[in-house]
Amino acid sequence: MPALYALMVRRLLPPRFAVVGVARTEGDDDAFRSDMKEAVQKHARDEFRDDVWDELAQNMHYVSTDFADEGGEDKLEEMVERLDAERDLGGNRVYYLAVPPAAFTTIVGALGERRRGAKGWTRLIVEKPFGHDLASARGLNAMLGEHFTEDEIFRIDHYLGKETVQNMLALRFANGIFEPIWNRQFVDHVQITVAESIGIEGRAGYYESAGAIRDIFQNHLLQLLALTAMEPPIDFTSESVRNEKVKVLRALHTPGPKSVVRGQYGRGFVEGEEVPAYREEKDVAPDSTTDTYVAAKLYVDNWRWADTPFYVRMGKRLARRETTIAIQFKRAPHPPFEEASAEGLRPNVLLVHVQPDEGVSLAIGAKVPGQGMQIRTVHMDFLYGGAFRTAMPEAYERLILDTLLGDGTLFTRSDEVEEQWLLVDSMVAAWQRDRPGFPNYAAGTWGPPSADDLLHRDGRSWRRH
Amino acid sequence: MAASLSAAPERERWSGEDVTLTDVGRALSRLRESSEAEGMRTSVMTHVAWVPEPWLEQARVALAGMGERHPSRTIILVPDADTGTNSIDAAASLERYALPGVERNICSEVIELHLHGKRAKAPASIVEPLLVSDLPVFLRWRGEPPWGAPELDQLVRLTDRLVVDSTEWDDLPFPYRNLVHLFDRAAVSDIAWARTSRWRTLLASLWPGIADVRVVRVRGTAAQAHLLRGWLCSRLGRDDIALEHIEAERLEGIDLDGEAAPFPPGDPPPPSEVLSEELDRFGRDRVYEGAVRAAIA
């Protein structure tokens, strides 16, 4: 709802529209508007304006129904038909499904039946999790395919709506200087970090069965990797971009179980406060073997990236909240300086900050002013907040607007999802055979020591902060 | 000393009580976004300073203007473990140094965190989210570090270089016994040692006559006296050089076997310049380590 409010502030919503909230909870339009107003006041990035809210609120309605009941969908359909006629909406509909997996099939089936023969366009936004393995994802794709065409399905991964993620495409394909060196000849390795300092925030029911690998790796992380490694698309249409991403996903492999590390946090400190272990969180099994951390070494088997490792790590209760993509270049082949003069020199790194401090920084070696030749690493920073005076839109604003416009570029296609699950399944299969010694890292740290070993074995180390 | 870019930096400031680190990060972003002039955020390090309240004013003086020479993010930690509340009060400021001749600025960020109650016991978990990615971390510890305490252990683990001033310690040379245990964990700089630099250059010029010195008398701080004797012992490969120490606030003179060594040329550098010099160093200072070991032998 804060995203809709932001679109309303900027006059990006169509002149005629209606928003219908649907849930099993009893309620009415006024209660729904009141709840949503509170959410907007609390979370919107813009200052709350009564005039904007009033305009949005008068287009908001609520239906209490359960699709599992016989004819449950009729109540929604009656409301939507009425609004459609009253406001001359042309029969165009966007259904946004943020529902538990168990309700998914029922709802999609009901919506699919109803839309047959309807005028106007229909689009379906589907939130994660999209399945829990390859078989279930294929099942969902097949079921969706019975009722909707692929260009009507918008599988949302909010990371793709972030400006900095899209900026990866601009950085790579709008600048002539990066692409020639964006390959195995010049890149030593790539590190992608999706770190959260928060715990599971009361979502044990979901997280216990998902873990970090399904919560983050299967979707956000692999999408970041695909955007980093993909070939230049011939244009920026949704099919061209997604064609290139899926090629990367098909080429991905991890060299074996020893190249994957999983972890689970124990007690520790975050922001100076002691926090409980994962197994001590509410509704988590005391002997849970759910992974709250995953690190892996991956390879992209193509001409551009052969033998160039992509090290990825993600987890909960890590030392800081940070999502970054670090392209570490090979060292200069023969620096003509004394060893001591370059003690403070680290390899060149192009660092894309996805969040927080959105921007890009390039670490380069520079001479320290003064006598002699002392060289150290300095950062050239591009910060979005400093360069552009307009506030950055939230990811959901962009993605909702793209759905209204029918642009699926920043959404995940069925074959992408299936390739992502294929890789996850291969990694998880190896876990069935062993019983991990959890917890194996303290909350507030950068994960288990075995994750450090993963890189040390290759003579490398994780970026330090 | 590096040329001054401007007489005084422009400064924008935010402060808050009982805040989270997310609040601090957002405040810094807003400060950057609200700036009138475009700022170039060029960082060469994260500079962490552990500054118990009694040292705070001195620390602020030493840090004033550091951003000009070492564009960085400075994080000043002021521990206050004895209060009943467990909270963080914070102030963040953006210092902007105008570049001469062009309409651009260099920006440095200063974050001052007052850690109340238990928050002072796990400082690494507070500092780590604020570190600038991939850049070296320098830790300036004011006063004598609490050897073996978790807060020291945690922060040293994050640090590339620990900067102390053993002039601020009591009962020398005994605390050096604890310091040597840190040499393999982080490079260590000692401001007291840096302040003997001009004198060491001069004493070295007395070679080979100085090789047989029996008694060294130092008019200066205890730290300088012990370190100079330790340095002579370690460099000369001896352990029989006697020390006579006459207390003074600064290094005023050295006698070798009763004969005054000549005064080194120039004036002693100001505190900020001494600290600044230490922030330009990266590797271990093996000569200093040898002097400390000899001082406690």
Image (cartoon, coloured by chain):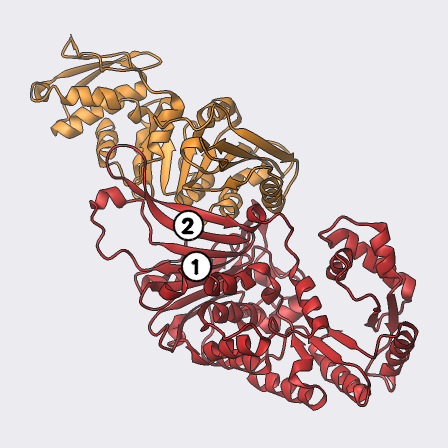
Chain colours: A red, B orange
**Disc sitting over residue B134 in the figure:** 2
Of B249 and A35, the residue lying toward us: A35
> Chain ID for label 1?
A
Q: Quadrant of the N terminus of chain B?
A: top left
Of A186 and A189, the residue lying toward us: A186
Task: Specify few, some or many for label 1: CA neighbours under 10 Å numbering under 14, 14-19, or 20 or more.
Answer: many
Q: How many marks?
A: 2
User: Residue B284: image x %, image y %?
Assistant: 27, 39
Of B278 and A228, the residue lying toward us: A228
Q: Is residue A454 visible?
A: no
Task: Specify few, some or many for label 2: CA neighbours under 10 Å numbering under 14, 14-19, or 20 or more.
Answer: many
> Chain ID for label 2?
B
User: Residue A55: image x %, image y %?
Assistant: 86, 58
Q: Quadrant of the C terminus of chain B?
A: top left
Q: With respect to residue B154, does A423 lie above or below?
A: below
Residue A132 falls in image quadrant: bottom right
Q: Are marks 2 and 1 on the same chain?
A: no
Residue B152 falls in image quadrant: top left
User: Residue A158: image x %, image y %?
Assistant: 63, 66
Tag 2: residue type? Asp
Are the residues flagged by discs 2 and 1 in contact, CB closer than 8 Å?
yes
Calculate the distance from the C-alpha at mark 2 to the C-alpha at mark 1: 10 Å
Q: SS class of the residue under badge 2?
A: loop
Q: Is residue B117 left or right of residue B278?
A: right
Q: SS class of the residue under badge 1?
A: strand
Of A208 and B91, the residue lying toward us: B91
Q: With respect to residue A353, does B158 lie above or below?
A: above
Residue under circle 1?
Answer: A326
